[in-house]
Image: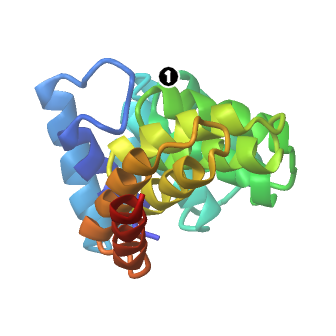
């Protein structure tokens, strides 16, 4: 997993953190540390991340947590990783919120709790993260970590689909086709199947043609 490179990319795109943007000089330090990390200069990267972490930079906390999990530090600690992730997530860093969600879902840090996992996913989803929105849609659709609620599932699938998630667009289309959690609407079903098809989903073009035939026959 190249979490660190992804972190920098998302920060530049303005998608990774709900926290205030970093000052240019601090962002430059973070960028250089990520480059050091990717180039194998682990000690240099760690020193910068630790310095930025002491200054309360959520992205630095996140990157250090990942290094603990990947056992790239002299004394790796899952407990310390969790502390850093919590601080980063509470600071509004969305990737930390998602990683905490996944960790609580799959036990990466030693403990499982689906409701707590989805507390973190929901924060990230409300910040506009499509991956978290998809997770929330699935949680409500299956009743896994959240109450089963098809209408809430449709809401989150719609948000993820609007953000470009192909799978969410297909699921939302099928919900409109069946009237599952939403009022049945074949026109909207065809629209979302088309969005999924445009994104590369293999099955969606066939559903678009099927609905076109159904509409023309009605």
Residue nearest the observer in this picture, 162 or 133: 162
**Quadrant the C terminus occupies:** bottom left
Q: Is residue 12 left or right of residue 201?
A: left
Measured from the top left, where is residue 181 in percent x and y? 66, 38
Residue nearest the observer in this picture, 82 or 187: 187
Which residue lies most toward the top here? Answer: 20
Q: What residue is rendered at 38% in x and 61% in y?
A: 193
Residue nearest the observer in this picture, 191 or 168: 191
Q: Is residue 192 left or right of residue 86?
A: left
The answer to whether residue 88 shows anywhere in this view is no
Q: Quadrant of residue 83?
A: top right
Q: What residue is rendered at 21% in x and 30% in y?
A: 26
Measured from the top left, where is residue 92 in percent x and y? 47, 24
Which residue lies most toward the front here? Answer: 218
Q: Is residue 52 left or right of residue 146?
A: left
Q: Is residue 121 above or below residue 166?
A: above
Q: Is residue 100 above or below residue 93?
A: below
What coloring was used for the rendering? Answer: rainbow
Q: Is residue 193 above or below residue 111?
A: below
Q: What residue is rendered at 30% in x and 74% in y?
A: 200
- Count neighbours of disc 1 (C-alpha within 10 A) and say few if under 14, some if 14 to 19, many if 20 or more: many
Instruction: Report how many numbered discs are placed on residues in the image.
Output: 1
Measured from the top left, where is residue 124 in percent x and y? 52, 34
Measured from the top left, where is residue 134 in percent x and y? 55, 49
Could you tell me which secondary element the residue under label 1 belongs to? loop
Residue nearest the observer in this picture, 151 or 128: 151
Q: Is residue 195 above or below residue 152?
A: below
Q: Which residue is mark 1?
A: 91
Q: What residue is rendered at 83% in x and 44% in y?
A: 143
């Amino acid at each position: 997993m190249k979490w660190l490179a992804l972190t920098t990319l998302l920060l530049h795109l303005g998608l990774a953190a709900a926290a205030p943007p970093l000052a240019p000089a601090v962002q430059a330090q973070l960028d250089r540390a990520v480059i050091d990390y990717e180039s194998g200069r682990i000690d240099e990267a760690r020193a910068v991340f630790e310095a930025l972490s002491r200054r309360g930079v959520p992205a630095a906390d996140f990157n250090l947590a990942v290094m603990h999990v990947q056992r790239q530090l002299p004394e790796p600690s899952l407990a310390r990783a969790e502390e850093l992730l919590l601080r980063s997530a509470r600071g509004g860093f969305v990737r930390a919120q998602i990683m905490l969600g996944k960790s609580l879902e799959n036990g990466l840090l030693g403990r499982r709790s689906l409701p707590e996992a989805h507390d973190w996913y929901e924060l990230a989803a409300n910040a506009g993260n499509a991956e978290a929105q998809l997770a929330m849609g699935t949680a409500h659709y299956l009743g896994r970590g959240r109450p089963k609620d098809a209408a809430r599932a449709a809401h989150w699938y719609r948000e993820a689909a609007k953000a470009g998630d192909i799978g969410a667009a297909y699921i939302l289309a099928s919900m409109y086709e069946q009237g599952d959690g939403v009022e049945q609407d074949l026109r909207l079903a065809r629209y979302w199947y088309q969005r999924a098809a445009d994104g590369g989903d293999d099955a969606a073009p066939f559903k678009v043609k099927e609905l076109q035939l159904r509409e023309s026959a009605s």
